[in-house]
Amino acid sequence: MLRFVTRRLAMLVLTLLVASFAIYASLSIAPGDPLSVLTGGRTLPPAALATLRARYHLNDPLLVQYWHWLTGALHGDLGTSIALRESVNTLIGERAGVTFELVAYASVLILLFGIGSGLLAGLRRGLVDTSVIAGTTVLAAIPSFVAAIALISFFAVRLGWFPALGAGTGGLDRLWHLTLPAIALALSALAIVARVTRVSVREEMGREHVQTAVSRGLPWHLVIRRHVLRNASIPITTVTGITIASLIALSAVVERAFSLNGLGSALVSAAASKDFAVVQGISLVLVAAFVVTNTIVDLLYAVLDPRVALGSRAE
Amino acid sequence: MSTVPTVPGLSGMVRRRTRGLAGSDKVAVVCLIVIAVALVVAVVGPALAPHDPNASNLNDAFVGPGGGHLLGYDSQGRDLLSRLLAGARTSILGPAAVVVIAVLVGVVLAVVSAWRGGWVDSGISIVMDILFAFPGILLAILAAAVFGPGLTAAALSLAIAYTPYVARVLRSAAVRERAREYIAASEVQGLSAWAICGRHLVPNVTPLIVSQGTLLFGYAMVDLAAISFIGLGVQPPQADWGVMVSTGQAGVLQGYPAESLSAGLCIVAVVVAVNLLGERLAQRNEERR
């Protein structure tokens, strides 16, 4: 187990290093002189240009620039947004809350309704099962932004139950504002989780040890809890974890649809306006969150199913 | 596979072939029809459009159906049906390109991994593991920052992001195939690695390639449309379903959701059909094994 954890953590560090370099380098080789953004098209005296170059380390080779950026990032300094004249840290700090709350809210919905409906459909054949299958087939195909527009159109504009745009201010108001965005973000992931849950439960119910337990006369709830759910929890945890991790990037789309001031929407506008320091900083944060979540899922998987850590590779 | 006849031979093979996907499966037939219609519209779409998809008359903005305009007008007073038909091109062919590139690269990497094994295999695995760190949408946003917004950069970055998924699934299938005796027999006979892989190994994992590619198309379509929706993919005024959901948003808030919802519905219909078909193909692969 310890070996598995160490190897997984080593891979995590390697991935983060390579990913951070890729993020930094790709934007550095972008066509166009970074100075032209800095000067905003004005012609500056050569002395001023030289000062700017020195301040932004533009004379250094790429690896040295990357090193400056990485050590800065590790010390909690991601540079300055040229367009917004604001430190990237402040920008991220102001916006991370909304994104985190949105993803957390969506995750709760997935855990409750995704796993819930999957269990229901898995344990009960008949109408419940059929309707869950039909429902999730359609829901899984609805892109988050289409769901967002449909929810706004119906629940915000037609019925007026929820606000259409914005994140609200703290507490219950925030919860109320984030309800539609969270549903939009969670919807297709929820359907996928429900389907996997249903199939895993069904598969376990058909196993011989479950049949044996039933025929020995064990109470139904004990059979379900000890034999079906414990084994089914392995694939369910993995898929739930992976889908929740995928929400981190997807939140950018939902934030745009609902005009939320989160990390994702800031990343999109920074990408459109070529504000590279912001793009680098937010990408790094999002990739790190995504990779760390995935690592946690992997470790959980090994905890639930010790065979994974014992075997050399999870095949 | 209980319907496979007990007498082996040609008749059995023929029946198995014709039984195919569409044999008795009504859902699969409907899916295939939806996909075929979508493909035809994607190829000849603009020619089918009853009006110029870009001709706008602001006086007609949000006007409902009528007078030769089956679905009415959008926020700019353009014919909605024509825009949906014209928008099919980028909305369908874009993801198709993503899938083709990801599958080609993924298959090559998988076969090379399985064939060479050893450090080549480990090296490719590590690179793929690192690529997993970039969700497709995030990679596309980065690409848009570097190269400017556009369909090409978005499609290429999605293809890169999807490659590890294809490579991982196909690698294990190729490894299993590589261990089969017929491969060893061909090697003993002196066939080149290229010939064995090209004529035997890849054709034998083709059903898996097809089912993976089909499922991938659903994801590619959703992600690509999402990138166009956030303004970093296909650029307006060009018609594209993702763009239309976005440009229609102003109308949604004023109580005219037709543009956004009809484009969204087109996406959902195609994705549902593709997903159902992909699931059926994948299920058939499982049964065949």
Image (cartoon, rainbow, N blue to C red):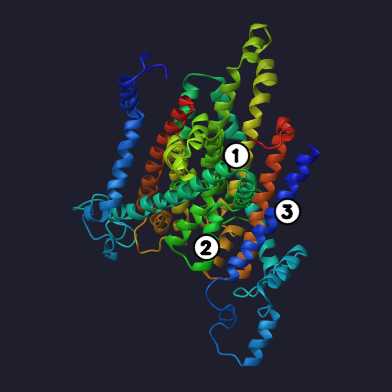
The secondary element bearing badge 1 is classed as helix
User: Residue at (27%, 57%) from the top-left corner?
Assistant: B79
State which mark lies toward you, 3 or 1: 3
Task: Report which residue position mark 1 lands on.
Answer: A109
Q: CA distance from mark 3 to mark 1?
A: 31 Å
Side of A294 where B16 appears, left or right: left
| Subunit of label 1 | A
Q: CA distance from mark 2 to mark 3?
A: 24 Å
| Subunit of label 2 | B
Q: Position of residue A250 (x, y in %)?
A: 55, 51
User: Residue at (57%, 22%) from the top-left corner?
Assistant: A203
Side of B22 where A272 appears, left or right: right
State which mark lies toward you, 2 or 1: 2
Task: Report which residue position mark 2 lands on.
Answer: B143
Q: B42 and B67: which one is in front?
A: B42
Task: Report which residue position mark 3 lands on.
Answer: A13
Question: Number of marks in the image?
Answer: 3
Q: Position of residue A149 (x, y in %)?
A: 45, 50
The secondary element bearing badge 3 is classed as helix
Label 3 in the same subunit as label 1: yes
Label 2 in the same subunit as label 3: no
Q: Earlier in the sequence, mark 3 or mark 1?
A: 3
Quadrant in which residue A109 is drawn: top right
Side of B197 where A291 appears, left or right: right
Quadrant in which residue A218 is drawn: top right
Q: Amino acid at mark 2?
A: Ala
